[in-house]
Image: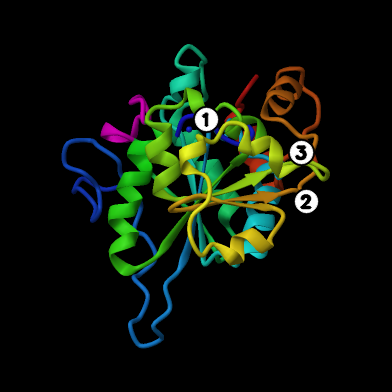
Amino acid sequence: MGHRWGSGCRHGNHRRPPGCAADGGPLSVKQPKAPSRANGRSRKIGLFGGSFDPIHVGHVAVARAAQRRFHLDHVLFIPLGRPPHKVRHRLAPFPHRFAMVALACAGHPQFVPSLAEAGPKLGGQRVYYSIDTVRHFRHVFHRHGDHLYFILGADSFLKIPMWKEYVALLNSCNFIVASRPGFRSDVLRMVIPRELLGRPHASAASADPHAIALRRTTVHLLDSVASDVSATEVRRRCHRGQSIRGLVPPLIEEYIGKQALYR
């Protein structure tokens, strides 16, 4: 999905699972059921993509903070296939990265691992762009009246003018931009086209100093995440034979050790 926090969205039997594209396009695991019309409530769905090479405690902290702050019903963790900005960067095989994401989601009812960018034969070799994956999930969820929230880091958001069809992307879903405490939302405004800023009757967003109301969507600043963990450091420590305890969830530490990853 283009660029992500910590790194742009972009099943396992012989039959094609429900929801998987026959042409190898965007896939997803079986998603949460559509909301009941009885309660009349639409859901808030977070889309959290990244290389997750490997997923670490910083990723989990961002997802938990976003889920709690914005009352997200589900957060979909989407391991990237071949990130457009990292086509020459060698990633761990997709099955390993997805397995680690699935393990990290264990114990968190709102967290859902997604195969949206697995591509043909679950190889994770196809390049997906954020706008394409968001359109896929708009088709999946918007027909039920649900709302999408694209989760990413501030550094990535500041590069959004470099993304494919970034204006369409900003118009397609809400954004949750994670940053360290003290980051100002005014900085985010600098990369948003002026014609997208402000929409009539956006009083709720205007009252929140951490929200930027666009004509169709809202950019929310989540400035309560402080983590010095990086996937690069985790890989480096693994390569050196050093401990990664506390940098990744315990199940991920165990998985990396058993699979001898990043040696």
Judge left or right: residue 21 versus residue 258: left
The extreme bottom residue here reads: 38
One can see residue 107 in this view: no
Q: Name the residue under label 3.
A: 247
Look at the image and give the residue range highlighted in magenta.
Answer: 119-128
Q: At 70% from the left edge and 40% from the top edge, which residue is drawn?
A: 186
Question: Looking at the rendering, which quadrant does residue 152 occupy?
Answer: top right
Question: With respect to residue 142, does 239 lie above or below?
Answer: above
Characterize the local packing of mark 3: few (<14), some (14-19) or many (20 or more) Cα atoms within 10 angstroms: many
Where's the N terminus, which quadrant?
A: top left
Image location (x, y in percent) of residue 226: 80, 43
Image location (x, y in percent) of residue 232: 69, 23
Check disc 1 and give the amino acid type: Ile
Q: Looking at the image, is mark 3 or mark 2 nearer the viewer?
A: 2
Identify which residue, 54 or 192, lies in the foreground: 192
Question: With respect to residue 142, does 220 lie above or below?
Answer: above
Q: At 76% from the left edge and 17% from the top edge, which residue is drawn?
A: 240
Q: At 78% from the left edge and 51% from the top edge, which residue is drawn?
A: 224
Q: Name the residue under label 1.
A: 160
Distance between the Cα atoms at labels 3 and 1? 28 Å
Q: Is the magenta stretch mostly helix, strand or loop?
A: loop
Q: Earlier in the sequence, mark 2 or mark 1?
A: 1
Is residue 121 highlighted in magenta?
yes
Where's the C terminus, which quadrant?
A: top right
Distance between the Cα atoms at labels 2 and 1? 21 Å
Question: Looking at the rendering, which quadrant does residue 254 occupy?
Answer: top right
Check disc 3 and give the amino acid type: Leu
Q: Mark 2 points at which residue?
A: 224
Q: At 72% from the left edge and 30% from the top edge, which residue is drawn?
A: 230
User: SS at mark 2?
Assistant: loop
